[in-house]
């Protein structure tokens, strides 16, 4: 799994005496980020690259970065460790390939999400790109493109944590304007599996706890899905955030985001059992 691979890379001894940083939060989980900080792994933004000490080790986050930023790091002589999720790497490669072949790229995801910004870096300057987060946004973008270039070759690529049903809905909307739309199967299988498991869980429980980071896109999607299914649901980053009213429900379900550490899941499960 991409997030676990990223953490393993970050916690592995670097073999260098230089400073070690992640470029942006490695993953969206507060506990993991605290542990990295405790071990001396700093976190910096892209606009801070120029202030890095020469010879620093920079770990590319699981969400990936644009090729221009990676090139800048290498030119400045930094040691780059790539912890980009393999699935995200594939999306980057596909986006670059389609862009170089003249396709207009629709990216399904959140405008300012790190993964989308990274993928977009492989497209910008080569072709037009639209970031669409819902069916209404896809309709507006497809209509705009159709008016400007009705015969455009188009492709849809999704943020790996995007919901499969949402992704299909965007596909259907864009195909009304561009029937020959190419669709890249970019949604992470683990994302679909977690959502399917949550649906089953909601059928058997009265309320649901989602364990994970508040900044995590896939965790937020799980929370949203539980609520859509009509269940009282809370996102919990640690045991202290378990809501007191949870004890009023007879059967409680526990789900977790992809970046949630196993020990945190175990702690929350133990606390819930103690309250039952």
Image (cartoon, grey):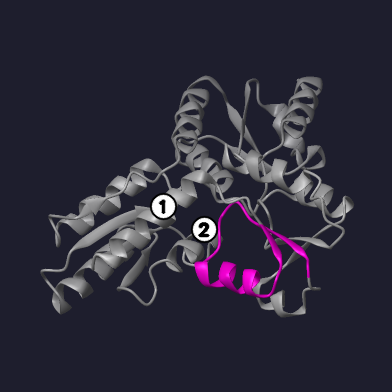
For residue 248, side relative to residue 145 (left or right): right
Residue 181 colored in magenta in the image: no
Nearer to me, 157 or 6: 6
Q: Which residue corresponds to mark 1?
A: 91
Q: Is residue 124 visible?
A: yes
The residue under label 2 is 115
Q: Which residues are magenta?
A: 55-80
Give the residue displayed 67% in from the left and 42% down from the top. Answer: 212
Please tell me whether residue 157 is drawn above or below residue 103 in the rendered image: above
Residues at discs 2 and 1 in contact (Cβ within 8 Å): yes
Q: In which quadrant of the rendered view does residue 133 lie? A: bottom left
The percent coordinates of residue 192 (x first, y second) are 44, 35
Q: Residue at x 33, y 65 (%)?
A: 137
Alpha carbon distance from label 2 to label 1: 10 Å
Q: SS of the residue at dot 1?
A: helix
> Is 28 placed left or right of 243 in the picture?
left
Task: Count residues near mark 2 (Cα–Cα under 10 Å), then give few for <14, some for 14-19, many for 20+.
Answer: many
Vertical position of residue 242 compared to residue 154: above or below:
above
Q: Residue 234 is drawn in which quadrant?
A: top right
Position of 13 with respect to 46 (left or right) is right
């Amino acid at each position: 799994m991409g997030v676990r691979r990223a953490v393993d890379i970050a916690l592995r001894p670097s073999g260098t005496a230089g400073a070690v940083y992640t470029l942006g939060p490695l993953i969206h989980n507060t506990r993991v980020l605290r542990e990295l900080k405790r071990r001396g792994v700093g976190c910096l933004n892209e606009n801070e690259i120029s202030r890095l000490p020469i010879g620093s080790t920079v770990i590319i986050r699981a969400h990936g970065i644009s090729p221009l930023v990676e090139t800048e790091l290498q030119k400045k002589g930094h040691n780059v460790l790539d912890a980009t999720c393999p699935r995200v790497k594939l999306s980057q490669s596909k986006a670059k390939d389609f862009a170089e072949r003249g396709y207009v790229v629709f990216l399904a995801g959140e405008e300012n999400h790190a993964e989308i910004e990274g993928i977009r870096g492989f497209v910008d300057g080569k072709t037009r790109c639209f970031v669409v987060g819902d069916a209404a946004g896809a309709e507006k973008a497809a209509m705009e493109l159709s008016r400007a270039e009705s015969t455009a070759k188009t492709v849809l690529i999704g943020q790996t944590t995007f919901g499969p049903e949402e992704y299909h809905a965007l596909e259907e909307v864009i195909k009304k304007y561009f029937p020959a739309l190419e669709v890249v199967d970019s949604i992470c299988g683990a994302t679909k599996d977690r959502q399917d498991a949550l649906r089953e869980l909601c059928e058997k429980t009265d309320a649901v706890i989602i364990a994970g980071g508040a900044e995590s896109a896939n965790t937020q999607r799980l929370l949203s899905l539980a609520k859509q299914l009509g269940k009282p649901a809370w996102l919990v980053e640690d045991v202290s955030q378990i809501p007191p009213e949870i004890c009023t429900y007879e059967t409680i379900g526990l789900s977790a985001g992809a970046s949630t550490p196993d020990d945190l899941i175990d702690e929350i499960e133990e606390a819930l059992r103690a309250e039952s």
